[in-house]
Amino acid sequence: MSSQLILVLNCGSSSLKGAVLDNGSGEVILSCLAEKLNLPDAYITFKANGEKHKVELTQQPDHTGAVGALMEELKTRNLADRVAAVGHRVVSGGETYSDSILINEDVIAGIEKCIPLAPLHNPANLLGIRAVQTIFPGLPNVAVFDTAFHQTMPEHAYTYAVPRELYRKYGLRRYGFHGTSYRFVADEAARFLGKDKNSLRMVIAHLGNGASIAAIQNGECRDTSMGLTPLEGLVMGTRSGDIDPSVFSFLAQNTGMTITEITDLLNKKSGLLGISELSSDCRTIEEEAAKGHEGAVLALEIFAYRLAKYVAGMAVAAGGIDALVFTGGIGENSDVIRAKVLGYLAFLGFNADAEANQKARFGNAGVITATGNGPVAVVIPTNEELMIAQDTAALSGLA
Ligand code: ADP
């Protein structure tokens, strides 16, 4: 008998990313990406067995139209009847959700309540949930929250040093993101190193277009670099990360920019892009830095330096450091960034192995430090879709 399939959805305001995974093997059978949703030229691209094709969403260019097109694609491939449950990436579960949960109307109301904490993302996630309820009626839906894993952070890690009333009234605190990736990578790293995760002090750096870092002790999160929003913390592709909050009044007074414009500048025009004046893409930055482009050289150095400072800080949160784990597009591929970070951290006992560092790329996991008494650094590819699919199967009684 053919095994059951799990559909995993990640909805943005104008996009929808989907993956259909085999519940037995975890293999991705079909993936899709809908773009330009809510514009007349919306389309969806399907990918299976290395082949791609595009379908225009002319009739209904929204999330429901995209899920409808996905259903048609599944029917054409005789896969529709095998889809047994749907997992949704939901960005913010606030303080309400510290685990994934089977979706019912109460959970939908709970996700709505968290909209002030993720005003762009949670509404899009809800559109995806509603679209699936319409197009795949009767299937169990599961919400997997980006924030859930960080709910074990102690109060002293998540509280901002501002009047506490703001926390009580508005929930103003640090929540963190990328939690699903951390949960997956923490387990994988412990398994790869042959260690019990409950006796490992890990610092994991998830470095993609958005980048963050987390301290893990006994398999639980103790601190992370993103805060109320994903803007806090590390230098990212287009985000500034930590910055003096007075930058807002400085720019307002000197340029006349509004709060919205400054927020946009810090989120979309800063980071690697802002420093290099070239690109937000680490590959491009590395290529240009190798040719001597001054902005690219500086962007790489700042990215690595700030990351190294954060690793040392996160070692405080984890009560020490046995393993530094790199993941995400940059973490899994950029031997250049990793070498620089390990260079800065040599004082903590990290002893980089240049050859191993070169080899751990393109999906290959690997220890990138030489054997010795110091802590290890290791590259572990993340797989958020698989984590979401596993939670979905477990909560739907399919595991
Ligand atoms: P997202 O956060 O959107 O999921 P990814 O995890 O895919 O992003 O990471 C994207 C980043 O990874 C980009 O900056 C990209 O340049 C970088 N990256 C991918 N491959 C390489 C590579 N071979 N060398 C350096 N950086 C890479």
Image (spheres, rainbow, N blue to C red):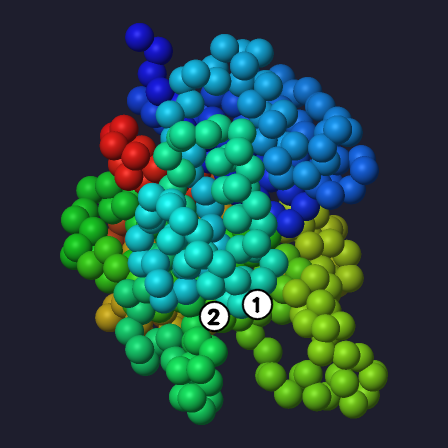
Q: Quadrant of the C terminus?
A: top left
Depth check: 10 or 58 in front? Answer: 58
Residue in the image at 43% along x and 72% along y: 174
Label 1 sits on residue:
231
Q: Indicate whether 145 appears above or below 82.
A: below
User: Looking at the picture, how far across and down is residue 195, in whole percent?
Assistant: 18, 47
Residue in the image at 63% along x and 32% along y: 66
Dividing the picture into quadrants, the one containing residue 26 is top left
Q: Indicate whether 381 appears above or below 157.
A: above
Q: Amino acid at mark 1?
A: Leu
Depth check: 96 or 262 in front? Answer: 96
Image marks 1 and 2: residues in contact by CB distance under 8 Å: yes
User: Looking at the picture, how far across and down is residue 303, in whole percent?
Assistant: 57, 63
User: Looking at the picture, how far across and down is residue 304, in whole percent?
Assistant: 53, 63
Residue 227 is marked as 2
For label 2, the SS is loop
Residue in the image at 80% along x and 35% along y: 41
User: Looking at the picture, how far across and down is residue 365, in whole percent?
Assistant: 38, 38
The answer to whether one can see residue 158 in this image is yes
Left or right relative to 350: residue 343 = right
Depth check: 130 or 32 in front? Answer: 130
For label 1, the SS is loop
Q: Quadrant of the N terminus?
A: top left
Give the CA separation, mark 1 to mark 2: 7 Å
Q: Amino acid at mark 2?
A: Gly
The answer to whether one can see residue 192 in this image is no
The furthest residue to the top: 1
Depth check: 73 or 249 in front? Answer: 73
Dividing the picture into quadrants, the one containing residue 390 is top left
**How many numbered discs?**
2
Residue in the image at 24% along x and 41% along y: 191
Dividing the picture into quadrants, the one containing residue 95 is bottom left
